[in-house]
Image (tube, rainbow, N blue to C red):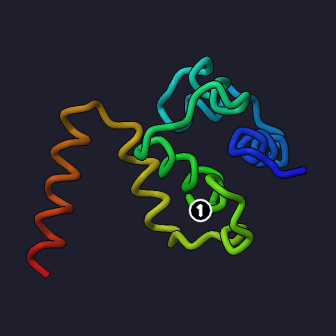
Amino acid sequence: MTLTMGDRLKELRQQRSLSQEIVAQSIGITRSAYSHYEINNRQPVYETLIKLAAFFEVTTDYIIDGDSRGTESQFAADTIEIIRLLNTMDENKRKESIDKMLDAIRES
């Protein structure tokens, strides 16, 4: 049996003994939206997919297609922390912070 994206999300969540509500709050979406991902009624937008991968410390490839290379996090700890911090900011502060990061990247 091939696992779906929803199956993998549910498995990742249950492995950590987390509720749908906790996952949803942690990545800044509603529990209802997250629930739809697990039951394959909807697929996350790119930004949400990145947040899910960071939250579960797997690659986006693993969430999408079960690529076994994605079982180990390829995200540095500081990247995960940045995503979590951005998620706690209001929209204006988040945009301002992202713009500053992009400017710093362009300068290097």
Q: Amino acid at mark 1?
A: Asp
Mark 1: secondary structure: helix
**Residue at x-position 8% and y-position 77%:** 107
Task: Locate residue 24, reporting x and y percent.
Answer: 59, 30
| Residue to which mark 1 is pinned | 61
Residue 44, compared with residue 11, is above or below; it is: above
Quadrant into which the C terminus falls: bottom left
Q: Is residue 104 left or right of residue 20?
A: left
**Residue at x-position 66% and y-position 68%:** 70
Q: Nearer the viewer, residue 2 or 34?
A: 2
**Residue at x-position 59% and y-position 62%:** 61
Residue 38, compared with residue 85, is above or below; it is: above
Q: Is residue 49 left or right of residue 100?
A: right
Q: Nearer the viewer, residue 28 or 48?
A: 48
Q: Is residue 72 left or right of residue 75?
A: right
Task: Locate residue 85, reporting x and y percent.
Answer: 40, 47
